Amino acid sequence: MTDISSSPILTVENLSVEFGHSRVIDNLNFSVIAGRTLAIVGESGSGKSVTSQSIMRLAESTGASYPSGRILFSGEQGEIDLLSQSQEAMRSIRGKDIAMIFQEPMTSLNPVFTIGDQISESLSLHKKLTKSAALDESMKLLKMVRLPDAEDMLNRYPHQLSGGMRQRVMIAMALACRPKVLIADEPTTALDVTIQAQILTILNDLQKELNMAVIFITHDMGVVAEIADDVVVMWKGKKVEQGPVKELFANPQHPYTKALLAAVPKLGSMAGEPFPKRFPITVMDGEGTRLVGEEKTQATACYDKSPLLSVRDLVTRFDSKKAFLDVSLIEYMR
Ligand SMILES: Nc1ncnc2c1ncn2[C@@H]1O[C@H](COP(=O)(O)OP(=O)(O)OP(=O)(O)O)[C@@H](O)[C@H]1O
Ligand SMILES: [Mg+2]
C-alpha cells in the first residue's frame, strides 16, 4: 500500500507558460507522490504536453517562457526548483531522475541508431557503465518490458519495429536509470486495445517495483479509471478540476469532465442489439456542453454482397529470421 500522507516528490506551483504573447498555461498547480499515478486529462490543445515539456525544461527549446511559477523536485540534493536550473544541470536530471515517454515514439527515437545503442546511451551517460555492461543492462530492460527476442531487438533500427514495440522500447529507455518520476504523454493512444492493456500492465508493475511517481497524460477516461490515483483536468491552459479518481468519476463538476465521462461506453448499453449502434456524443460548446449526432443503428456489415476487397494467400516477409507475417485469407465484406 502507498502511504498517502507522504510528501510530494514533484510540485508544480503557479506555473504559467507563454509562447510570445500567447499564454498557454495559466497558474497551474498540482503535485505527485512516490508510488502514485496522477492523470492529467484535457482536450487537444489544453496544455498537457506543454506542461510535461516544461517539467523536463524542453519547452523553451521551442520558444516557451515561464512568466511565473516553480517546479519543485525533491531529489538527492534536497528540494530544487527545476525552473531555475541551467540546461547543463537539467541534462543530469533528465533521463536519470525524471524521465519521459513522448507522445510520438518515432520523433524521439533516433532513426540512425540501433535500439541497443539508444538505450545504452543513457546508461553510459548517467550510470557511467561500459559499453558492454550498458548493452547487457539494455537487454534486461527490453525483457522487463516484455519484448520478445530482446537480443535480436538490440540490433534493430526503430523503423523495423511495430508501433507497440517502439512504445515498449521508449518505456525501456525511460526506465533505464530507474527514475523517481516518469511522465508518460499519451503513451497508448495510438495503439490497439490489446497492446494498450499490455503496456498499462507493464507500467503498473514497474511503478510498483520502482516506487515511481507517474504523471500520465491521456484523454481516455477508461485508461484513467484503470491506472490513476488522482486526476487533474485541464481546460484551455488552466486546471479546472482535481481529485482522487473515484470522487471525480462519481461527482464530476466541470462540463468538460462530464463530457469526457459521457464518452465512455456504458456496459450493457448494447444488450440485445443485433448491429453496431451510433450514440450522440457530448462536445464542448463555449463554456458548456452540447449533444451532437443521433442514436442510430449502423448497418455496417452486409454479408450477402460480393467483397469490395479480397486478400488471398498474401505472404509478406522481412529480411529477418523471425519477423514474418503470413496472412493467408482475409476477406473484407461490404
Ligand atoms: N512551440 C509552440 N509555439 C507556439 N504555441 C505552441 C507551441 N507548442 C504548443 N503550443 C500551443 O500551446 C497550447 C497547448 O499545446 P499542447 O501541445 O500542450 O496541447 P495538448 O494538451 O498536449 O494537446 P494534444 O491532446 O493534442 O496533445 C496549444 O494551443 C498549442 O498551439
Ligand atoms: Mg499533447
Image: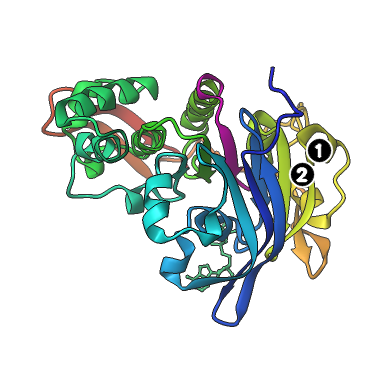
x, y percent for residue 147: 33, 24
The answer to if 211 sits in the magenta stretch is: yes
Badge 2 or badge 1: first in the primary sequence: 1
Q: Secondary structure at mark 2?
A: helix
Q: Quadrant of the N terminus?
A: top right
Q: Is residue 225 above or below residue 206?
A: below
Q: Residue at x 38, y 32 (%)?
A: 177
Which amino acid type corresponds to the residue marked 2 in the rendered image? Leu
Residue assigned mark 1: 249
Q: Residue at x 61, y 61 (%)?
A: 47
* Residue at screen point 22% across, 22% down: 136
**Looking at the picture, how far across and down is residue 103, in whole percent?**
46, 50
Whether residue 298 is visible, yes or no, is: no
Q: What is the secondary structure assignment of the residue under circle 1?
A: helix
Q: How is the image coloured?
A: rainbow
Q: Is residue 135 left or right of residue 59?
A: left
Label 1 within 8 A of ligand 1 by Cβ: no
**Vertical placement of residue 48 versus 225, above or below:** below
**Which residues make up the magenta segment?**
208-219
Q: Which residue is mark 2?
A: 261
Quadrant assignment, res 38: top right
Alpha-carbon distance for marks 2 and 1? 8 Å
Q: Nearer the viewer, residue 143 or 320?
A: 143
Which of 215/305 is in front? 215
Amino acid type shown at disc 1:
Phe
Is 280 on the left or on the right of 61, as rendered?
right
> Quarter for ligand 1?
bottom right
Residue 288 location, x and y as percent?
84, 64
Q: Residues within 10 Å of mark 2 (few under 14, many from 20)?
A: some
Q: Position of residue 323 (x, y in %)?
A: 20, 27
**Residue furthest top as drawn:** 1
**In which image quadrant can residue 332 be found?**
top left
